[in-house]
C-alpha cells in the first residue's frame, strides 16, 4: 500500500534530522575551535583580538576553499551509493582522490599565507596589527593539510549516513584546543609562554588530532574497515580526479565568494578603527557559530538528495530538499530572536562587560548583532539550498549566482552604505544582509527550476 504524502514528509523529516543533528553538533564543535581562539585572545585585550581576527579572516578564506573542494566527496559518494548500494571500490577511489586533491591544494596555500604581513599591509591594515597577525598565521597554517584530510574522511562518513564518529572526534577536539591554547598562552605544564600566538599552535595541533582520530576509526571500526580506504593509496584515478575537480571547484569558489565577502567586510571595518574591528570579529564569530546549524543541515540534505539522484527518483529528491529547507527556516527564526533580544548575553561570552576598555567595542557589537539578526533566515536558506543543489551535482550555476549576489550586491552595498552614506560598520553589515538575501532567492529559484525538469538516465558505475 503506498504511503500517504504526509507520511512521506514526516519520514523524510525524521531521517534528515537523524542524519543532520550529529553533523550540526560536529560543525558547532569545529566552529568552537576558532571561537575558542577569539575567546582566549579576548582576555589579552582588543588589540590581541584585532590582530588575531586579521589572521583568522585571511586563513579562513583558504581553509574554506579547501573545505569546498573536499566537500565534493559527499555528493559523489552519495550518488554512487544511490546507484550501487553496496559499492566498495567506487567509494574508496573517490575518497583517495579527495586526499590527493588535499595535498595538491595546500602547497600553494602555504606559500601565500607565509606572506600574510605583506597582504595585510597591501589591504591598508595597521602595520603593528599586520605584523602580529602574520606571526599568528605562520603558525596556524600548518593545520590546513590534516584538516582537509579530515574533511574528506568526514564527508565519506556522512555519505554513508553514519555521522556519529565525526561527532565524537569533533567534540573531543574542543577541550584539547582550549586547554592547549590556554597553556601555551600562559606557559603552563612546562610549555613555552607564547602569548598571542599560543592559540595558533593549539589549533594546528588540534587539526592534526582530528585527522588522526577519524583515520583511526576508519581503519579499526568494523563497518568502515571493509572499504580499505588507505589501501593502494598511490594508485591514480585520473578520470575520478577530473570529476572531483569538476564538482568540487565550483563548490569551493561558491564558499569562498561567501566567506571572502565577510572577510572583505572585516577589512572595510578595519579602516574605521580598532574597536569596530574587534566588535566585528566577535559578532562575526557569533554569526558564524549559528551558521553551523544550516551548514550541517546542508551536508545532510546533500546526502539525502544525492541518494535519490543516484536512484533517479525525482519525487524523493523534491521531498528531501524541501524538508531541509523548511527545517532551516524554523531553526533560524530562533537564532534571529536570540540575536535581537539577547545581544549582551552573546557578546559577554567574548568580552568582559565590566571592563571599561571594552565599552566602545560592546556598543559596536550590539549594533552589528541587530543587523545580523535580520539575515539569519536568508543566510540559512542560501546554505541549505546550496546543499540541495549539490546533491543533484548542480554546482556551476549556483557558483555564478553566489558571485553576483555576494560581490555584486553585498560588497557594493557594504561600501556604499558604510562610506558615502556614512553608516560605517552598520552599513557594512547591512550590505552583507542584502547580498545573503539575494543569493537565498536565486538558489531557491534554481532548485524550483531544476525540479520541473525530468532527470536524465543515470549512467552505470565503473
Image: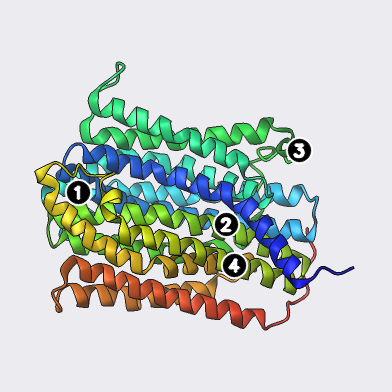
Is residue 322 visible in the rendered structure shown here?
yes
Q: Position of residue 367 (x, y in %)?
A: 22, 63
Q: Secondary structure at mark 2?
A: helix
Circle 2 crowding by C-alpha within 10 Å: few under 14, some 14–19, many from 20? many
Q: Secondary structure at mark 1?
A: helix
Mark 1 or 3: the one toward you: 1
Q: Quadrant of residue 429?
A: bottom left
Q: Say left or right for 460 vs 10.
A: right
Quickly name the residue at label 4: 388
Quadrant for the N terminus, please: bottom right
Q: Residue at x 42, y 30 (%)?
A: 176
Label disc, if present, on residue 299 of the rendered structure: 2
Q: Residue at x 15, y 78 (%)?
A: 421
Circle 4 crowding by C-alpha within 10 Å: few under 14, some 14–19, many from 20? many
Mark toward the start of the polypeptide (2 vs 1) = 1
Quickly name the residue at label 1: 50
Quadrant for the C terminus, please: bottom right
Q: Residue at x 57, y 50 (%)?
A: 21
Q: CA distance from mark 1 to mark 3?
A: 48 Å
Q: Position of residue 198 (x, y in %)?
A: 28, 32
- Between 157 and 179, the residue placed more toward the observer is 179
Q: CA distance from mark 3 to mark 4?
A: 29 Å
Q: Say left or right for 257 vs 294.
A: left
Quickly name the residue at label 3: 226
| Rendered image coloring scheme | rainbow
- Between 350 and 7, the residue placed more toward the observer is 7
Q: CA distance from mark 4 to mark 1?
A: 36 Å
- Between 198 and 144, the residue placed more toward the observer is 198
Amino acid at each position: 500500500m503506498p504511503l500517504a504524502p504526509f507520511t512521506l514528509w514526516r519520514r523524510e523529516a525524521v531521517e534528515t534530522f537523524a542524519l543532520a543533528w550529529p553533523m550540526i553538533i560536529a560543525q558547532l564543535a569545529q566552529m568552537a575551535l576558532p571561537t575558542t581562539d577569539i575567546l582566549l585572545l579576548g582576555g589579552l585585550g582588543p588589540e590581541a583580538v584585532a590582530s588575531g581576527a586579521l589572521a583568522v579572516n585571511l586563513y579562513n578564506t583558504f581553509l574554506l576553499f579547501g573545505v569546498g573542494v573536499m566537500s565534493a566527496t559527499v555528493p559523489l559518494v552519495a550518488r554512487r551509493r544511490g546507484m550501487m548500494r553496496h559499492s566498495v571500490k567506487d567509494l574508496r577511489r573517490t575518497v583517495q582522490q579527495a586526499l590527493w586533491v588535499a595535498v595538491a591544494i595546500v602547497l600553494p596555500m602555504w606559500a601565500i599565507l607565509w606572506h600574510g604581513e605583506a597582504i595585510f599591509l597591501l589591504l591598508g591594515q595597521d602595520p603593528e596589527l599586520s605584523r602580529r597577525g602574520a606571526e599568528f598565521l605562520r603558525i596556524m597554517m600548518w593545520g590546513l593539510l590534516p584538516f582537509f584530510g579530515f574533511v574528506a574522511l568526514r564527508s565519506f562518513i556522512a555519505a554513508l549516513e553514519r555521522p556519529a564518529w565525526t561527532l565524537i572526534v569533533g567534540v573531543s577536539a574542543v577541550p584539547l584546543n582550549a586547554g592547549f591554547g590556554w597553556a601555551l598562552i600562559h606557559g603552563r605544564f612546562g610549555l613555552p609562554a607564547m602569548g598571542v600566538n599560543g592559540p595558533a599552535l593549539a589549533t594546528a595541533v588540534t587539526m592534526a588530532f582530528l585527522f588522526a582520530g577519524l583515520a583511526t576509526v576508519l581503519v579499526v571500526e568494523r563497518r568502515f574497515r571493509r572499504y580499505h580506504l588507505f589501501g593502494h593509496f598511490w594508485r591514480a584515478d585520473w578520470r575520478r580526479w577530473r570529476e572531483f575537480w569538476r564538482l568540487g571547484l565550483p563548490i569551493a569558489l561558491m564558499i569562498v565568494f561567501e566567506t571572502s565577502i565577510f572577510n572583505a567586510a572585516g577589512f572595510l571595518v578595519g579602516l574605521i578603527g580598532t574597536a569596530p574591528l574587534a566588535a566585528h570579529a566577535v559578532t562575526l564569530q557569533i554569526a558564524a557559530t549559528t551558521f553551523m546549524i544550516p551548514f550541517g543541515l546542508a551536508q545532510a540534505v546533500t546526502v539525502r538528495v544525492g541518494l535519490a539522484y543516484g536512484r533517479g527518483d525525482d519525487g524523493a529528491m523534491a521531498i528531501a530538499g524541501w524538508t531541509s529547507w523548511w527545517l532551516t527556516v524554523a531553526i533560524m527564526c530562533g537564532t534571529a530572536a536570540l540575536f535581537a533580544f539577547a545581544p549582551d548575553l552573546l557578546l559577554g561570552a567574548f568580552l568582559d562587560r565590566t571592563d571599561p576598555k571594552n565599552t566602545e567595542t560592546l556598543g559596536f557589537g550590539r549594533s552589528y548583532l541587530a543587523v545580523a539578526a535580520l539575515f539569519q533566515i536568508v543566510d540559512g536558506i542560501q546554505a541549505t539550498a546550496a546543499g540541495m543543489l549539490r546533491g543533484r551535482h548542480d554546482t556551476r550555476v549556483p557558483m555564478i549566482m553566489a558571485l553576483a549576489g555576494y560581490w555584486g550586491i553585498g560588497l557594493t552595498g557594504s561600501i556604499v552604505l558604510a562610506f558615502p552614506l556614512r553608516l560605517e560598520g552598520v552599513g557594512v553589515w547591512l550590505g552583507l544582509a542584502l547580498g545573503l538575501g539575494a543569493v537565498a532567492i536565486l538558489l531557491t529559484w534554481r532548485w524550483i527550476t531544476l525540479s520541473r525538469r525530468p532527470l536524465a538516465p543515470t549512467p552505470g558505475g565503473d
